[in-house]
């Protein structure tokens, strides 16, 4: 079987909010799905090594903020490409802390819900949590971002520890400009009108905020 056929599966884009004592953090996941109704139960898959996964295992609670097409790439980059173990990933992101101590985003997200873990299942690399939705917003606003939209419009990439990560083809986004790749998140800069060298020194990666020096010519 060619793994590529799995690329035809569709996903959304979500921020998973967690707590660790009084500390809060969040990560990005595309693997959230509803598995039953009454009670409403969802499943999410997270890499074992993720700090967020560790927090959920410890506390049995997490939130899901559904990203909208208006959620900026930098929010996804800030939450998706670094570890909350040593950084405060939420420091520049508008959010609020629920009474249960878990954060939810206020950055153009459609809605949020709070989940209580019922069971978990392990694979070699990931933990799948099944959780009951115990609270949430009254309504959903805006258009939910799909994983396909994230790749096609925002030009985002999946980090290597995502369940759906695939090696990208080197010249995939060649459009006439020279390709410069962000070594942090994999974003490819190739604007044919503004060569990479002419970008100002304080220019940063639009996805993960890495400095210009983090880019390498492909
Ligand atoms: Fe980047």
Image: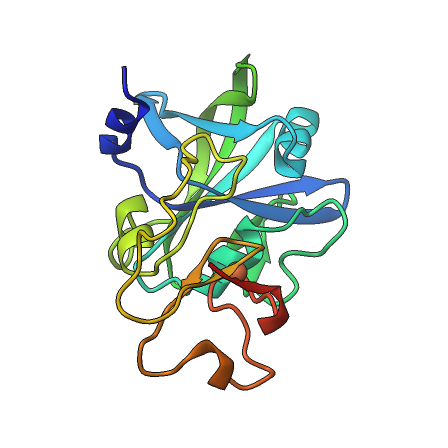
Residue at position x 39%, y 63% from top? Answer: 108
Q: Quadrant of residue 110?
A: bottom left
Please tell me whether residue 4 is drawn above or below residue 146 in the rendered image. above
Q: Is residue 154 toward the left or the right of residue 213 in the image?
A: left
Q: Quadrant of residue 122?
A: top right
* Residue nearest the viewer, comparing 165 with 139: 165
* Residue nearest the viewer, comparing 214 with 32: 214
Please tell me whether residue 187 is drawn above or below residue 58 in the rendered image. below
Identify the image's colour scheme: rainbow, by chain, secondary structure or one colour. rainbow
Question: Measured from the top left, where is residue 212 in percent x and y?
Answer: 58, 72
Please tell me whether residue 24 is drawn above or below residue 56 in the rendered image. below
| One can see residue 151 in this view | yes
Residue at position x 65%, y 30% from top? Answer: 49
Question: Measured from the top left, where is residue 109 in percent x and y?
Answer: 39, 57
Question: Measured from the top left, where is residue 75 in percent x and y?
Answer: 49, 61
Question: Measured from the top left, where is residue 143 in percent x and y?
Answer: 24, 56
| One can see residue 139 in this view | no
Q: Is residue 149 toward the left or the right of residue 71 in the image?
A: left
Residue at position x 56%, y 36% from top? Answer: 62
* Residue nearest the viewer, comparing 71 with 174: 174
Residue at position x 36%, y 21% from top? Answer: 39
Q: Quadrant of residue 178?
A: bottom left
Please identify the quadrant where the N terminus is shown: top left
Please tell me whether residue 80 is drawn above or below residue 60 in the rendered image. below
Q: Is residue 206 toward the left or the right of residue 53 in the image?
A: left
């Amino acid at each position: 079987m060619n793994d590529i056929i799995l690329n035809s599966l569709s996903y959304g884009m979500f921020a998973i909010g967690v707590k660790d004592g009084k500390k809060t953090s969040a990560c990005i996941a595309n693997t959230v799905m509803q598995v039953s109704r009454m009670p409403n139960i969802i499943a999410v898959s997270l890499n074992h090594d993720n700090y967020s996964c560790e927090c959920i295992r410890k506390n049995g609670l997490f939130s899901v903020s559904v990203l909208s097409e208006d959620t900026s790439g930098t929010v996804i980059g800030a939450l998706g490409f670094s570890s909350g173990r040593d950084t405060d990933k939420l420091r520049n992101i508008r959010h609020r802390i629920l009474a249960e101590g878990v954060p939810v985003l206020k950055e153009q997200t459609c809605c949020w819900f709070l989940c209580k873990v019922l069971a978990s299942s392990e694979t070699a690399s990931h933990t799948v949590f099944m959780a009951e939705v115990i609270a949430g917003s009254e309504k959903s606003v805006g258009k939910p971002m799909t994983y396909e939209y994230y790749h096609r419009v925002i030009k985002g990439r999946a980090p290597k520890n995502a369940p759906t990560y695939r090696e990208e083809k080197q010249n995939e986004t060649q459009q006439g400009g020279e390709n410069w790749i962000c070594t942090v998140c994999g974003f490819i800069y190739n604007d044919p009108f503004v060569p990479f060298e002419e970008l100002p020194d304080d220019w940063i990666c639009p996805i993960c905020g890495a400095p210009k020096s983090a880019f390498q010519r492909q």
